[in-house]
Image (spheres, rainbow, N blue to C red):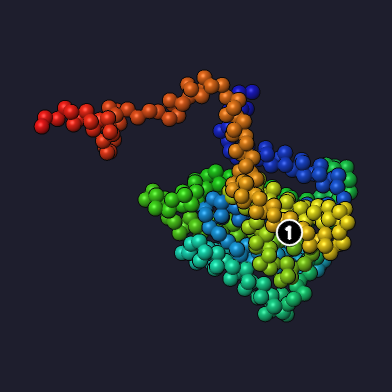
Amino acid sequence: MRAVARLWSSSTLLRHLLVAAVALVVVLLVLGGVSDFRRFQLAEMAYLGIAAGGLTVLTGLNGQISLGHGALMAIGAYTAALLLPDRDASVPLLVVVLASVLATLVVGVLVGVAAARLHGPYLAGATLALAVAVPGIALTFKERLGGEQGLRVVLPDPSEPVLDAAYFLTGQELTNSGYVALLAWLTLIVTYVLLANLSRSRVGRRWRAVRDDEVAAELAGIDLGRARVSAFVVSAAAAGAAGAMLAFTVRLAAPSSFTLTLSLTLLAAVVLGGLGSLGGALVGAGLLTFLPQVITGLGRDAGLSDIRAAELAPLIYGVVMVLVVLVAPLGLAGALRGVLHRRRARRTPPDLVRDASPATDPAPDPELDPVPGPPRSGASSSTTKGTPA
């Protein structure tokens, strides 16, 4: 048992793989017990969670603000649409997802190189221009990209081995909506495992160092530009995978799906969940997916018309956003971590805290660590008394 505990605490990859295996089981159980409409909503939550996970790495770990991740998702979605125009397309879905990630990654490199020279509102403005410009490309090249109507995405039927495996694991026939939701959540789990390992690696520590203090990071030998570009590229790759999942879910890649609202929605999910937390990004994506429908239902129950109930959702959503920012500035995940730390501190015996405090915060010893500095008041008076006039 101790060997398992030691392996659990020492191997980050094993810990993440076990969590991913548990998450996969939960996903299979949930998808097997809900309706097709809920599966569609869960697929929406999954692709929002993928994009929000990439954005929380960029904003939470590296300190860069992006308002253009909706445009990066558009690149992934249009790549998937071009590869899946009809049922005769024989491109495997794995190749489609990888091609979407690769296309977005190339754009991420170009944008990241330019963004590495910008900070704060200038970077936000540059990415905002990306969010406005990219959907317009589809309107310019109507013949190839479908114009305002966009491109249809024809998802091939699942193969027999996939159907058999799904029936073996869930005991149910795999429907089209269930197939799409399963694809989206598998992509989310793989993406989160990769992002979690990357954030705990040397690359992730470099991103945090650049975020916390650029001067200290540069003095430590970290290339600031390379660290910023790598964070942007990783985040863009996640957005490309999310765009492909969006195209699979709605079966369409159109400019109206990638407006500035989508980019702001992703940023709101990251802020609600907690910057730098993958779990928080997923919680934020879940809130943005299910909260409007819950509020609309409550409005109908209160006697409002359908239009009034639908208009109530953005208001409540904005109020929740303001409350989270005021009450829990670190987001829902940060607030939960704070509660757990306080409970753990209360359960710790005072003797252990007293015994552990000298080891964690040793008192300064002037003989062992004679740090020069301004004289203290008591020392100054004694020196003055001992000094001959």
Identify the residue at image location x=65%, y=62%.
263
- Residue at screen point 69% across, 54% down: 319
Pick the front one: 386 or 271: 386
Q: Amino acid at mark 1?
A: Leu
Residue 54 % position (x, y): 61, 54
Residue at 20% x, 30% y: name it: 383
Question: Which of 381/9 is in front?
Answer: 381
In the rendered image of this protein, does residue 27 appear above or below residue 104?
A: above
Q: Residue at x 66, y 75 (%)?
A: 136
Which quadrant does the N terminus fall into?
top right
- Residue 175 seen in the figure: no
Q: Residues within 10 Å of mark 1 (few under 14, many from 20)?
A: few
Q: Quick one: which residue is furthest to the left in this view? A: 389
Task: Please say if 382 is above or below 115.
Answer: above
Residue 304 image point, x, y percent: 86, 59
In the picture, measured across the screen, residue 107 lies left or right of residue 386, that is right
Residue nearer the viewer, 346 or 143: 346
Q: Which residue is mark 1?
A: 315
Between residue 381 and residue 351, name the one nearer to us. Answer: 381
| x and y percentages locating residue 217 in the rendered image | 41, 50
**In the image, 292: left or right of 217?**
right
Extreme residue in the top direction = 351
Element under disc 1: helix
Residue 210 placement (x, y as % from top left): 46, 52
Of the 4 image quadrants, the one containing the C terminus is top left
- Residue 25 seen in this snapshot: yes
